[in-house]
Image (tube, rainbow, N blue to C red):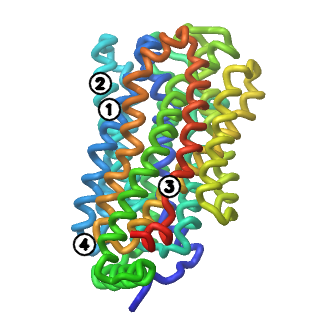
Amino acid sequence: MKTKPDLRLSTLINISFGFFGVQIAYALQSANISRIFATLGADPHNLSYFWILPPLMGMVVQPLVGYFSDKTWTRMGRRIPYLLFGAAVAVLVMCMLPNAGSFGLTVAAAMTFGLISLMFLDTSINMAMQPFKMMVGDMVNEKQKTKAFSIQSFLCNAGSLVGYLLPLMFTWIGIKNIAPTGEVPDSVKWAFYIGAAILIGCVIYTVAKVKEYTPAQMAEFREAAKEEDKKIAAEDTNADKSALKYALKVFFQVGVVQFFCWAAFMYMWTYTTGTIADTVWSTHDTASAGYQDAGNWTGALFAVQAVGSMVWALALPLFKNNKIAYSLSLVIGAAGFVLVPYCTNQYLLFVPYFLIGAAWAAMLAMPFTLVTNAFEGNPRMGTYLGLFNCTICIPQIVAAALGGLTLKALNSVQGNMLILAGVLLVIGAVCVFFISEKRKALKNA
């Protein structure tokens, strides 16, 4: 019975290389959405509502990509057609979004244009992002999964590093970082343009280098995985049901951890700029040079987070116990969140955001390692991974919907939202230890 072979390091890198470009787009969106809409005229108490749309689109798009790509077999592959289409749309929309305030529209019309552009951007990013996770699930054996997702996490954070720093880099070379009231600065516009070019280049590289397994090969791998589960369960007649029961159990257990983690990061993306504009630059005026400097510095801090995440991604495969690695990472990140509002020096802020990177590295690697291992051999893995994206999207939607009310309850101090994020990560770290282990679960099924 043929099993998935060990892949060379270069192959593992090629499978996820396009993720570098996709993550540049995602980083530009994450670091600049609150800044863009605040610049267009949004009230701080309403900022979180603009963040409902991205995860909502992800919750719709990624399960559909998973479902249909499970049934797709073309000369180009199974997942790659969706990757290419999503990347192409993302490139077009990245050139539109930062221009929302540049067409002489009213504030309401500019925000509407921005929201529509954001909807298409996040839809296309989700369509381009999900195939990378699915290709790891399809092509990498269980032994190499942690390594493969750690490589993906590393490339993801390297892309984030570039995306977060682009506006600051363009400001340093002389591109204007201020603009008339209601318009987005040129430094942000050019960051989106260059990010779009890098995105399509990286995706084309992966398409050229990666050849997905054929339907016949995938069928052989599924049969081999079923045989292994039968051995573990020691009861052939119940093996398939036991394996699926265990996999769904892990799906929901990891989903609980995901809820607290992604709610925490939603508040970081939404309130970092406002927090540091207040604590470091002492301003709430979104048209001021200080606020725009804070916006650039948010990108720098998120870049530090990406560096911390890349460093920690290299450490994750060294842990023998995935759950200990996962939980410890979240606790380290929680400490970083709690420290942010107490750092009044812009450079001192590097410390908490470096710590937050540990949590981000684990969030990118560990959930998908646990879930793809649980569903190993299941022909509908893409569908399940698409549905698993709901465990990323739902907490963001809930956090965004409650953001305005929560901010008011916390005295309208945006820094308090980051302390709350730290508390949420600690709860997630505790929940990690309730995730079932495969061998024990199948033997007891």
Mark 4–mark 3 distance (CA, rounded to whole Å): 37 Å
Q: Which mark is residue 180?
A: none
Q: Which mark is residue 117?
A: 1
Q: Position of residue 100 (x, y in %)?
A: 36, 23
Mark 4–mark 1 distance (CA, rounded to whole Å): 30 Å
Which residue is disc 3 drawn over?
435
CB under 8 Å between discs 1 and 3: no
Which residue is disc 2 drawn over?
113
Q: Residues within 10 Å of mark 4 (few under 14, many from 20)?
A: few
Q: Residues within 10 Å of mark 3 (few under 14, many from 20)?
A: some
What is the secondary structure assignment of the residue under circle 3?
A: loop
Which residue is disc 4 drawn over?
74
Please give the name of the residue rendered at 26% of the width and 66% of the height, measured from the top-left corner.
Answer: 70
Nearest the camera: 28 or 350? Answer: 350
Of badges 1 and 3, the one in the foreground is: 3
Q: Position of residue 197 (x, y in %)?
A: 46, 48
The kind of residue tagged 2 is: Phe
CB under 8 Å between discs 4 and 1: no
CB under 8 Å between discs 2 and 1: yes
Mark 1–mark 3 distance (CA, rounded to whole Å): 38 Å
Residue 174 visible (yes or no):
no
Lateral position of residue 430 relative to residue 39, left or right: right
Nearest the camera: 22 or 238? Answer: 238
Mark 2–mark 1 distance (CA, rounded to whole Å): 6 Å
Q: Earlier in the sequence, mark 4 or mark 1?
A: 4
Residue 385 visible (yes or no):
yes
Please give the name of the residue rendered at 28% of the width and 55% of the height, measured from the top-left corner.
Answer: 65
Q: Earlier in the sequence, mark 4 or mark 3?
A: 4
